[in-house]
Image: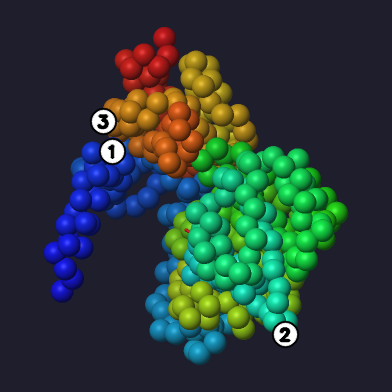
Amino acid sequence: MYSKKLTDNIKGELENLKSAGKLKVEREIEGLQGPEVSIAGKSVLMFGSNNYLGLANHPEIMKAAEQSLKTHGYGLSSVRFISGTQTIHRELEQKLAAFLGVEDAILYSTNFMANLGFFASIVNEGFGATEWKDAIYSDALNHASIIDAFKLCNRERLEKRIYPHKDLAALRAMLDEDKAKDIRNKIIVTDGVFSMEGDTADLAALVGIADEYGALLFVDDAHAVGVLGATGSGTPEYCGVHGRIDVLSGTFGKALGGAIGGYIAGKKELTEFLRQKSRTYMFSNSVPPVVVDASMRALELLKEDPTILTRARDNAAYFRAGLEKLGFEVLSGSHPIVPLMLGDAKKTQEMSKQLLAEGLYVVGLWFPVVPEGAARLRFQISAAHTHEHLDRALAIVEKVGKSMGVIN
Ligand SMILES: Cc1ncc(COP(=O)(O)O)c(C=O)c1O
């Protein structure tokens, strides 16, 4: 049994979080995820989920999962290289690669694991050398999984540079400064869409910079795959550089079905290398077959019914315009992440609480998740929302916004 001291420390830290208003509360959904969910016996509008395409419980996705359960079972009880690879795993990897416009893909249990696996595999590998140093240039607002990925890299082998959010002049200055140094690999890493802002990295410019400096460009497209671009293949397509990103990572846990599962996509030698060297791939179970088959169905659905994509976009534009018309300050953009800026953390917490009491679920974000003084409500719009849902949500935000004095 662990010591009383550790027990007291843990309890003390939980108390600290509570008194600082930072304790995360997990609201329990009774039943399915969707545009409306049941919480504590009450139906509420869901505007706080990454279910951008409404596929989380789409009948076609559920049918594919049910069918897969019958043909491929529940689990493999193994990692890929021991006895955990079914034909459908390779099939999904190949279909995904074709969708993303790259040579190959490798599945991971999550996008988080994919990011952890990639950086350590490259940076820690000597390729026969005894001395080397790699440099990583990372946007300041990149996801936690990228930040944690650096922690798995051998410290002596990694120069870590953080450039201010989307500040490409600063990135260039860092690359220029490193020109005289003996750096083996330069890796530029960015989210495609930044989850707190809903804004997009300028991938066309980043491809140019990567080419100019001989750097590898890594894009984590978790929030954009299945959402942005003409066919929904993500930020590269949206920015006109489809197929030109060296390495992509992404997830099946958001737009593409919403269950779990991640990937790295890029050149074939890279995916082969990761199959041999990436510890979060080699020593962790393969993705469950129901998820694999349902993910393939999600990719098919995008092709069969492009209105899913346009509906998500139209709904986001409609909701964004609605909030602006009411007088709220909203961050501009074209992604279904719609941040309503409030600034103050306490006001954000209070407004999120009141909205839920009125039947609208939306997540509030404040420091340290976003910069101090930039607290916000993050609305996430879905293709599954109807105009009735959107109008009802706008009416609730208007009522609460007026009663709290946020708008007149
Ligand atoms: C940019 C980004 N990368 C990675 C992840 C992790 O995805 P997963 O849930 O598949 O591990 C997220 C999820 O929040 C994300 O927003």
User: Mark 3 highlights which residue?
Assistant: 357
| Quadrant in the picture for the N terminus | bottom left
Q: Earlier in the sequence, mark 3 or mark 2?
A: 2
SS label for mark 1:
loop
Q: Earlier in the sequence, mark 2 or mark 1?
A: 1
Q: Is residue 341 left or right of residue 210?
A: left
Which residue is depicted at the point 57% across and 45% down? 141
Q: In front here: 51 or 244?
A: 244
Picture quadrant of residue 249: bottom right
Residue type beneath disc 2: Gly
Q: Is residue 190 left or right of residue 260?
A: right
Name, please, the residue furthest toward the bottom.
Answer: 82
Residue type beneath disc 1: Ala
How packed is label 2: few (under 14 Cα within 10 Å), some, or many (20 or more)? few
User: Mark 2 highlights which residue?
Assistant: 128
Q: Which mark is residue 20?
A: 1
Which residue is depicted at the point 37% across and 30% down? 345
Which residue is depicted at the point 78% across and 61% down? 181
**Image location (x, y in percent) of residue 71:** 46, 80
Q: Earlier in the sequence, mark 3 or mark 1?
A: 1
